[in-house]
Image: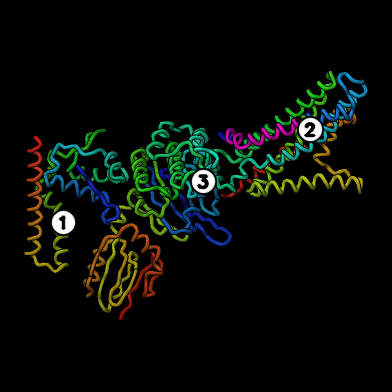
């Protein structure tokens, strides 16, 4: 898994890591049970503080996306987000609100906003397929 | 205080013609990378000299690794590695001899580290120090600091003369062998991009005072540029807003917290919010430190005070 | 570590000084014994006695003393004082040692070197004298090493202290030389013009050597104590200065 961070961007580094991990999982590049690099290794490779990576991993673990064996490696959790549906909806709502606000701010109408979201979902689907094909070819 | 790597309270240092340090309250937690930023003459070097016992504070006190500054200075020095800005070592000795000189002072010294890092950093170990280039001199100083087995590294401009490859290698070493071991790194530097990359915390000093001290992640999550257009922009009072620039009907603010709420408020009052954008460390630094120069409307007060907009 | 460094910085100066001083004294001894006292191997007993006495007084007491003072002054520029000029003081003073450690360690290395130089010179002179006159008349000339080394330590300490104060080896040497010069001239002038006895380090060294030869009956104990005190007070002063110094 290749992660990349841009320290000069306004987005905090730990968030960048979290976002990328979530993306990889959503796109199927990372599947449940896959191991992630150790905090130390990842920090060292990216030349960023171990505290930053640790924070990202902790956040993801708290959200149920990653799982750490005590004293060992971190893995993609078997049942990512094994929360109740209501809980999962609750977690997504702030992002939905953000899209609504931003979209309105940018003077896009609801239809265009929904179209955008659909396009992104389709793109993810495509990525999922691509990684799936790669996997199959590798075996 | 003793759980902090570095802690100072109302530290003051007065030289004959200037207050170099003016009521400084540093809080550097253990196990983090702390970027100590400021312009030349802001008081960075004076502060560091006080921490190391090279100079005495005029007022105030502090601890380093739990030991009171001044009273237990040797205990501090046993556990602290320092790379000075000048990076001047004995010219008539070679790096190998400098290692020999230095290692006797530190029981936790690691010869293995010397071997490893001298190779990784590509240091010519048998050339006289006076004949080394600036970059090589920096490398030797870094080598000595890394091999010391210290709990705290105080690095003043550690990148001087280093080419990008060596600098990258040094950052990797710092992360892998120092930070991940729970040691604390205190970096004073102008190289904001390097600091931004590796720092957990940032302390911004200007005219001897701390303007800002917070986790870098938090700063980045909260600080925003808000650019607004509108005539007759109404009065806004807030301790978290700084007017940076004003041109025609456009105003640019630095908002330290709840930028979206601020933008929404302006929006409700009839202005057009052109942009709410995140800030890089460099932009934050320049905005906070250059506040008097950037603002052209002439109505900027101290950073913590309210800013009021002119009614027109 | 620091001892090793002090030695490394001063060893060539030390070796040159030893050779120069020893060679000079041996040469002068030879001249004095052969031509001054007119002694040939196993020569006339009176001449031999005269030779022993005059060599002790003039060569060891006079020439060696003067040169040891001079060399002591020169050697005193070592130690933490000069590091300020070279900008390495920052590095040194951040090593985990109390500041007095640097002062006394540097001083001790220098004083040891100086003492070794004096001992070697005295021993070679003594040996030359014994050889040229055919026998050992008395062991007392060896005792001149004490006052000569002590005087040298005072001169050394003077420059050492001044270098720490001035934070510069050249200035330290100049001040040290200036003060020593005054200490040489002023007592001499006071004694000559006003018959007043002021303490002078060279005077002390000469008198002590005179006592060794038996020329003066009273051992100058007071001077011995005074100059020992001064020899130790100078590095102590340097310690006080360095402890308050800001880099």
Relative image position of residue B259 (x, y in whole percent): 26, 63
Q: Which residues are magenta?
A: C3-24
Circle 3 or circle 2, nearest the eye = 3
- Asked if residue C241 lies in the magenta stretch, the reply is no
Label 2 vs label 1: CA separation?
90 Å
Residue at which label 2 appears: C147
Nearer to us in this view, B11 or B118? B118
* Helix, strand or loop at mark 3: loop
Q: Residue at x 28, y 77 (%)?
A: B249
Parent chain of label 1? A
* Helix, strand or loop at mark 1: helix
Label 1 vs label 3: CA separation?
54 Å
Relative image position of residue B160 (x, y in whole percent): 43, 50
Q: Residue at x 63, y 48 (%)?
A: C167
Q: Residues within 10 Å of mark 1 (few under 14, many from 20)?
A: few
Residue at which label 3 appears: B88
Residue at which label 1 appears: A95
* Helix, strand or loop at mark 2: helix
Q: Residue at x 36, y 54 (%)?
A: B192
Any part of residue B264 in sight:
yes
Relative image position of residue B281 (x, y in whole percent): 33, 57
Any part of residue B65 in sight:
no
């Amino acid at each position: 898994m290749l992660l990349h961070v841009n320290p000069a961007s306004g987005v905090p580094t730990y968030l960048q890591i979290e976002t990328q991990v979530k993306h990889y999982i959503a796109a199927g590049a990372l599947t449940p049970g896959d191991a992630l690099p150790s905090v130390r290794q990842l920090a060292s490779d990216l030349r960023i503080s171990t505290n930053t990576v640790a924070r990202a991993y902790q956040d993801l673990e708290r959200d149920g996306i990653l799982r750490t064996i005590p004293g060992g490696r971190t893995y993609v959790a078997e049942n990512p987000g094994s929360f109740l549906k209501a809980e999962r909806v609750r977690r997504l709502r702030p992002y939905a609100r953000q899209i609504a606000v931003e979209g309105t701010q940018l003077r896009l109408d609801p239809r265009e906003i929904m179209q955008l979201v659909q396009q992104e979902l389709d793109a993810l689907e495509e990525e999922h397929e691509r990684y799936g094909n790669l996997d199959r070819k590798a075996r | 205080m003793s759980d902090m790597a570095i802690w100072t309270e109302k530290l003051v240092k007065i030289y004959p013609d200037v207050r170099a340090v003016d009521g400084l309250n540093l809080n550097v937690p253990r196990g983090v990378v702390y970027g100590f930023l400021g312009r030349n003459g802001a008081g960075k070097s004076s502060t560091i000299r006080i921490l190391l016992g090279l100079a005495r504070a005029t007022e105030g006190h502090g601890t380093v690794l739990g030991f009171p500054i001044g009273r237990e200075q040797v205990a501090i020095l046993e556990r602290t590695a320092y790379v000075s800005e000048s990076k001047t070592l004995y010219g008539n000795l070679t790096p190998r001899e400098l290692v020999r000189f230095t290692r006797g002072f530190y029981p936790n010294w690691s010869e293995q580290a010397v071997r490893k890092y001298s190779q990784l950093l590509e240091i010519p170990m048998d050339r006289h120090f006076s004949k080394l280039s600036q970059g090589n001199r920096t490398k030797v100083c870094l080598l000595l600091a890394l091999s010391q087995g210290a709990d705290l590294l105080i690095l003043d401009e550690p990148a001087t003369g280093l080419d990008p490859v060596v600098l990258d290698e040094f950052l990797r070493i710092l992360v892998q062998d120092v930070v991940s071991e729970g040691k604390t790194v205190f970096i004073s530097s102008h190289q904001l991009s390097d600091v931004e990359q590796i720092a957990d915390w940032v302390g911004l000093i200007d005219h001897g005072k701390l303007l800002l001290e917070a986790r870098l992640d938090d700063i980045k999550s909260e600080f925003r540029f808000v650019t607004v257009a509108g005539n007759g922009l109404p009065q806004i009072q807030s301790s978290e807003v700084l007017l940076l620039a004003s041109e025609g009907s456009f105003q640019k603010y630095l908002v330290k917290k709840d930028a979206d709420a601020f933008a929404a408020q302006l929006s409700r009052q009839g202005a057009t919010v052109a942009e709410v954008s995140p800030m890089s460390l460099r932009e934050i630094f320049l905005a906070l430190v250059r506040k008097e120069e950037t603002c052209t409307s002439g109505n900027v007060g101290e950073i913590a005070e309210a800013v009021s907009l002119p009614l027109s | 570590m620091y001892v090793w460094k002090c030695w490394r910085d001063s060893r060539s100066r030390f070796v040159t000084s030893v050779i120069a001083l020893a060679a000079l004294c041996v040469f002068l001894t030879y001249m004095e014994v052969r031509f001054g006292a007119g002694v040939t191997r196993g020569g006339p007993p009176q001449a031999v006695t005269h030779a022993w006495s005059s060599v002790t007084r003039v060569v060891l007491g006079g020439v060696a003393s003067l040169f040891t003072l001079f060399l002591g002054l020169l050697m005193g520029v070592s130690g933490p004082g000069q590091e300020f000029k070279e900008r390495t003081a920052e590095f040194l003073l951040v090593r985990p040692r109390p500041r007095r450690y640097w002062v006394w360690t540097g001083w001790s290395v220098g004083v040891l070197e100086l003492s070794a130089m004096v001992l070697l010179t005295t021993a070679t002179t003594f040996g030359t004298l014994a050889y040229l006159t055919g026998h050992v008349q008395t062991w007392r000339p060896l005792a001149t090493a004490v006052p000569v080394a002590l005087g040298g330590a005072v001169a050394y300490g003077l420059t050492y202290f001044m270098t720490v104060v001035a934070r510069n080896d050249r200035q330290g040497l100049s001040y040290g030389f200036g003060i020593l010069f005054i200490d040489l001239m002023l007592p001499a002038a006071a004694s000559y013009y006003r018959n007043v006895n002021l303490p002078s380090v060279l005077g002390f060294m000469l008198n002590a050597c005179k006592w060794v030869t038996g020329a003066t009956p009273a051992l100058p104990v007071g001077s011995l104590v005074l100059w020992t005190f001064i020899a130790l007070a100078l590095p102590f002063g340097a310690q006080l200065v360095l402890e308050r110094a800001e880099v």
